[in-house]
Image: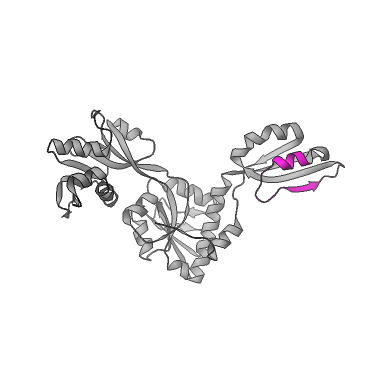
Amino acid sequence: MTKVKFLIPKGSLEENTYQLLNEAGYIISGQERTYRPTINDPKILLKILRPQEIPIFVEEGLHDVGITGQDWVKETGVDVQTLMNLEYGKVKLLLAIPEQWTHINSFSQLLKNFSDDNKIVRITTEYLNTTVKYITTNSTYIELYGDTQPLVITPWWRKGENSKVSVFLSFGATEAKPPENADAIVDIAETGTTIEQNNLKPIECLYESQAVLIVNKDALKNPSKREKIYDILTLLKGVIDGRKKIHIFVNVKEENLNQIIEKLPSLKGPTISPLSTKGWYSINAVIDRKDFHELLPTLRKLAQGLVVHEPRQILSLEEIAGEENGSETYSKN
């Protein structure tokens, strides 16, 4: 039996990942004791790794599918397919400097100020590739240093020729580095509170990130793996979509039926059924959660017996089938 090798993340994405899988109907056990927990699908093999590693192992085909952060897909520069955004783990990758530098409010100002004073700009980060790309595309950097590469320093190697702008690999606690060990940091933040508590101020946002479901391209060419991968996608997407919807049931008099139908959004169209009492109908519809409060006054005036359910999943089977048959374009990284 062909099995799909599925990587799930350890760390900041861990709790929300387990919640998503649980709501999708997966039962996972043993994750407290092992990095190879069991799952109630015999065609799936789970393994837990850090999100930093997951994009590389999926690209290499050592695993077929994985959940990681967009930030690590970008940082590693892997050639994988992103099947969907999972809409949790939302963070920003920020450039921050000591808050007392009130005269500096952009990266360009930082570069110019340090260049004028003939000082080295020291930046520490876990995101070496992303940071170097950001530095070398800055117009002020190009004006000052041309197409030279900033010096990148790790415990094992150094590369780049421009020592005036040096990027140091951070192994965590990045916010603690300035001002003694760094002049600026590039790090992720959810709310920015940790950055502020360490007397830093963000001056630029490199990009925003969230958790994503990624897949090895060759795995999609394997018919048996492809089927199971799309099963996973369908169930996870069902949870994400279900969180945005509510399921309503209302009873309405025949004279008010058309007024409600005109105002009632739904997936395809509401289900309308006559009740046993003549002149009464039942309306069954799935609507966007965000529309409910706007719709409520109409329902309150024209309908009776409103019942609201929160769906566990909304499975958009036609949409998934379209992607699987190639009628949709995958997002690329």
Would you identify the image quadrant in which residue 202 lies? top left
Q: With respect to residue 40, does 266 lie above or below?
A: above
Front residue (pair 106, 312): 106
Magenta region:
258-278
Locate residue 82 relative to residue 172 in the image: left or right. Answer: right
Q: Looking at the picture, how far across and down is residue 15, in whole percent? A: 44, 45
Q: Nearer the viewer, residue 183 or 29?
A: 183
Q: Position of residue 289 (x, y in %)?
A: 60, 40
Q: Classify the position of the C terminus by image quarter.
A: bottom left
Compared to 150, does 306 lie above or below?
Answer: above
Please name the residue shown 62% across and 38% down the image: 291
Query: For the view shown, which residue lies furthest in the right direction?
Result: 278
Quadrant for residue 252, please give it. Answer: top right
Q: Is residue 71 above or below residue 46?
A: above
Residue extending farthest left: 118
Residue 238, position as x, y percentages in the image = 57, 52
Is 65 placed left or right of 245 in the picture? left
Tell me, yes or no, whether the highlighted magenta stretch contains residue 277: yes
From this view, report whether residue 51 is shown above or below residue 290.
below
